[in-house]
Amino acid sequence: MPHALTPLESRWLAEVIRQHEAAGSPLEDGDLLPQVLQAPADAETRILRRAELIGAREGWLASITAWRGHARTTLLVLALIALISGFGAALGVMGTGDRPVNVLWLLGSLLGVHLFSLALWLVGMTAGGQGGGALLGRAWWWLSDHLGALGTGRKQDALIGGALLHLLAQHGLLRWVSGAISHLLWLIALLGALLGLLLALALQRYAFIIETTILPSEVFVALTAALGWLPAKLGFAIPDAGMVRASGEGLPQMEAARLAWSSWLVGCVVAYGLLPRLLLWAGCQLLWMRGRSRLRLDLNLPGYAALRARLLPASERIGVVDQAPSSLPRARIQAHAAHHGETNLLVGLELAADIIWPPAEAERLATWTVVDSREERQRLLEALQAHPPARLLVALDARLSPDRGTLRYLTELAGHADDTHVWLMDHEPRDAGRIGHWHEALQSIGLPPEAVIDDDPQHALHWLEQGP
């Protein structure tokens, strides 16, 4: 049984489905809509519920779980490689103790690549890139995505990693995820280097020297003191000026000098390696967790606008609060005296934002703006009462489900026109079940079958302009 989705996974799954449908592969959801509409009347909540049901049916829930498993495995493997690499690098640069160790070369070997990558990360963050220059984080992401897509062997699962990438980048979270992974791997590598350094110092006897041809010894005295300032604040011992000068003159090294240089080296690795990475990892992790808790779907993206109209009927958006009956209401179009109107009017009712209104074919006809809110409904009724039309054509979004508020309003509109037809717009063959529900509901309020026009603009507009 799939585990309960986290808020991030729910939005991740919704983005997978949005991208799949945006690529021209709409998914059938007619049998799922009753369950979706039981969710609270909030667009995002219902979109997430629809995504969860479709994801369980199409196998994307299991694919996301598998992708996360591959990502964790990849991170563990990279962490193990980082630990072994850092440990081996420290043992390699320390040598076997049969020859003196140049402390500055040693420190550069241990921290040089780390400091260079840290500078790249800072430059990337300053430049505003989503990855923030986190090279190890990008490597982890690339491996996780490719292993995740290959692991399931399903073509549609190629969207999994890309959907998550788009979702995080859109909300500015990708830099913090990549940064946290990169700093974590560097932290592990430096921890391995520290362990290797401590092991070498514990099992071998080293002499430490400073070699130069042109620089005076005072330069190294000042450099050693400057680099040792922060380690000294953390409790590490540092060599004094006499020890530094002696190391540069090749004099026999006292035990106290060996211990001081060892402490200085360990302190520099901790202060300039482990500590910065630990703080940066904690900072990125904190910003990632805070951003993740605020993550919401962008309902303005292509695909979500149409879903919002389908999953949140206008009767809910404008605040219908009476309790829903067990069946649709029995309100019917009442017989009324002819108004003898002289105009014809085309009205759009509860149309989604992706439906072009007014239609290009209706440029010669009188049209009303899309009616959606309670105030707009009232204004239209007042206009019809003042100037009743001879023929009234009401366009509805066939992708929605018929609801009692819409049907009741249609009976009111029909009472102010001599003849009323309904035009069901923008439906596809996969909506056949919903179209049937519309025909049944419209006949239940008194519209004859011939007064309901399916998605046929020429037929609908010809009737409005010229009549039967």
Image: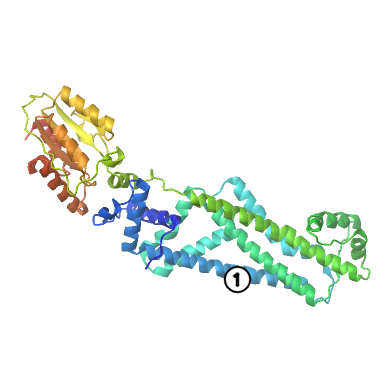
Q: Nearer the viewer, residue 266 or 81?
A: 266
Q: Amino acid at mark 1?
A: Leu
Q: Nearer the viewer, residue 168 or 32?
A: 32
Q: Position of residue 105 (x, y in %)?
A: 79, 64
Q: Position of residue 314 (x, y in %)?
A: 27, 40
Q: Residues within 10 Å of mark 1 (few under 14, many from 20)?
A: some
Dividing the picture into quarters, in which one does residue 215 lie?
bottom right
Looking at the image, residue 40 sits to the left or right of residue 329; the answer is right
Could you tell me if residue 221 is visible in this image? yes
State which quarter of the image contains the C terminus.
top left
The residue to which callout 1 is attached is 80
Look at the image and name its color scheme.
Answer: rainbow
Q: Is residue 248 above or below residue 50?
A: below
Q: Is residue 329 above or below residue 231?
A: above
Q: Secondary structure at mark 1?
A: helix
Q: Position of residue 125 (x, y in %)?
A: 60, 49
Looking at the image, residue 412 sits to the left or right of residue 286; the answer is left
Q: Position of residue 46 (x, y in %)?
A: 33, 50
State which quarter of the image contains the N terminus.
bottom left
